[in-house]
Image (spheres, helix red, strand yellow):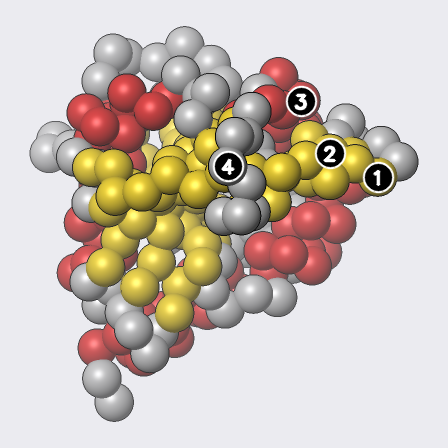
Amino acid sequence: MSERYLGRDLLKALKATAGIPGPAVVIPVGSPPKAFLRPAATEKKLLNAEDIRMLTKWRNRFVQAFLTEFKATDSRTAQWLIDVVGNNESKILFMVDDMNSRTFGYMGLDYIDWSRAYGEADAVVRGAQATPGIMKLTLQTLLTWAQGQLGLRDLNVRVRADNAALEFYRKVGFREIRRIPLRAVETPGMVRWVEDPSLENADLYLVHMHW
């Protein structure tokens, strides 16, 4: 079995065991560790209520950083963890904890194509105060782990051009490869931004970056 398909099994195992009582499987950030990447629980009976509360709060605070804009609720976040994260073998979410077990952010991997060894950083959010530079180090740690443990060789990120985090991604080591126009699709209670290369003059663009 190739390295990347072993990585798929590892990702599945991490998600299946997240939230089980006892010592947690985490990814240390820095040496000596300065923070930890902790897989978010996605099994209904293991969901972490405090994680859900923070995910909801920070999702609403930074709603315009996402391609789907809506008002998050705890119940909606819980269902998203179960249905969208838990049941998707190409996606995982990590909470970012400091050395005192205080959660100050989250980030994940998504759009993994195991046949191409491709993946993307996703949902990178710092919601609380943290040591300067720690989010940069944490994301670099996650990307390095994705290469070494999951076998992903092609790592990208997509970010809205109006997102101040664009410069953050450059500092992490991403470089811009293209910009695609975005078109707003409005439905009751939600705005979705979808790529539309046919637009000549768009109000918003999606920046694709490679690490």
The residue nearer to you, when weighing 56 against 22, is: 56
Disc 4, SS: loop
Residue 187: mark in rendering: 1
Is residue 168 positioned above or below 20 on the image? above
Q: Which residue is mark 4?
A: 200
Which of the two discs, 3 and 1, labels the residue nearer the N terminus? 3
**Cα gap from disc 3 to disc 2, whole angstroms:** 14 Å
**Cα gap from disc 3 to disc 1, whole angstroms:** 18 Å
Image quarter where the N terminus lies is: bottom left
Which of the two discs, 4 and 3, labels the residue nearer the N terminus? 3
Is residue 170 positioned above or below 111 on the image? above
Is residue 19 among what the camera can see? no
Is residue 76 positioned above or below 59 on the image? below
Place of residue 168 in the rendered image (x, y in percent of width and height, measured from the top left): 28, 22
Residue 60: mark in rendering: 3
Circle 1 or circle 4, nearest the eye: 4
Residue type, numbered disc 1: Thr
Residue 191: mark in rendering: 2
Place of residue 163 in the rendered image (x, y in percent of width and height, measured from the top left): 45, 21
Disc 2, SS: strand
Neighbour class for label 1 at 10 Å: few (<14), some, many (≥20)? Answer: few
Circle 3 or circle 2, nearest the eye: 2
Disc 3, SS: helix
**Cα gap from disc 1 to disc 4, whole angstroms:** 24 Å
Indicate left or right for 158 with 204 as reference: left
Circle 3 or circle 1, nearest the eye: 1
Residue type, numbered disc 3: Asn
